[in-house]
Image (cartoon, rainbow, N blue to C red):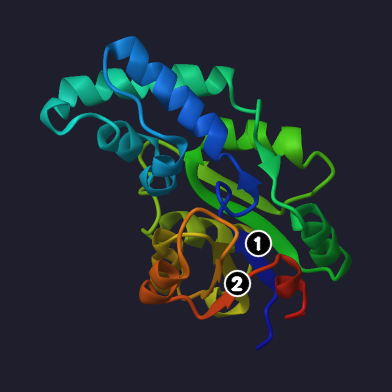
Amino acid sequence: MDFKAVLFDLDGTLLDTLADIAGAVNTALSGLGYPQHPVSAYKYFVGEGIRVLARQVLPNDKKTPENVAACLAAISREYAKGLIEKTRPFDGVPGLLQELITKKIKIGIVTNKPQELTNRSIREFFPGIPFNVVIGEEKGRPIKPDPAGPLMALQAISVKPSECIYVGDSGVDMQTALNTGMFGIGVLWGFRAKEELLTAGAKKIIAKPGEIGDLF
């Protein structure tokens, strides 16, 4: 396989954001008078965008459009304040990115995280990494697993889907790879289990970031 590019998911793949997301959402829920969730529960709440997250964390009898909108606004406000308090790159990720750059492999990010927060995260944690393309969630564009974002990224870097690896930690990510025609690699250091990744169509499962560099 002659791959020319690697696109990455962000949360749970490049960055361990779970504690900051859980903290922000729990603060938002408390402020709205709703019960909080343990940090571990957020492994299954995240991955489908902030709007889905706002609905999932509400009690079952409180998921009205008005409540979801209020929860979304509160989460957005709290997370923007605490975006980088506990978040860190996963071990081995910075080295992998540098290795791919050295090997002249194009790299990018396609995430369901809002674009503004995505850009801030990259500036903070990967200031020396020249990503070729960064696609976050923006109003009017479908989120993953819809192929719209990945196809936009591929067009921007002039790479065919069959020439690109997509790396992620969830079933949504693997479905995204399938829907776009990319080679999906599931990572075991993220938020979801191996079984979910395989069921969703992962072509390869890896336990360490360096295994991606070995493909080139």
Q: For this rendering, which residue is in front, 77 or 58?
A: 58
Across and down, in percent, residue 5 comes to: 68, 69
Residue occupied by mark 2 = 165
SS assignment at label 1: helix
For discs 1 and 2, the disc positioned in front in the rendered view: 2
Q: Residue 208 is drawn in which quadrant?
A: bottom right
Position of 83 relative to 170 (above/below):
above
Instruction: Answer with left or right where residue 69 lies relative to residue 172.
Output: left
Position of 168 relative to 160 (above/below):
above
**Kind of residue at disc 2:** Ile
Across and down, in percent, residue 87 comes to: 65, 35
Mark 1 neighbour class, 10 Å CA radius: few under 14, some 14 to 19, many 20 or more: some
Please give the name of the residue rendered at 30% of the width and 33% of the height, measured from the top-left corner. 57
SS assignment at label 2: strand
Q: Earlier in the sequence, mark 1 or mark 2?
A: 1
For the N terminus, the image quarter is bottom right
Across and down, in percent, residue 8 comes to: 60, 58
Q: For this rendering, which residue is in front, 176 or 45?
A: 45
Instruction: Answer with left or right where residue 89 lies relative to residue 80.
Output: right
Please give the name of the residue rendered at 70% of the width and 60% of the height, measured from the top-left corner. 107
**Kind of residue at disc 1:** Ile
> What is the C-alpha distance between the residues marked 1 and 2?
13 Å
Is the Cβ of the residue at disc 1 closer than 8 Å to that at disc 2? no
Mark 2 neighbour class, 10 Å CA radius: few under 14, some 14 to 19, many 20 or more: many
Please give the name of the residue rendered at 39% of the width and 67% of the height, measured from the top-left corner. 196
Seen as rendered, the residue at the extreme bottom is 1
For the C terminus, the image quarter is bottom right
Please give the label number shown on residue 157: 1
Instruction: Answer with left or right where residue 130 lies relative to residue 76.
Output: right
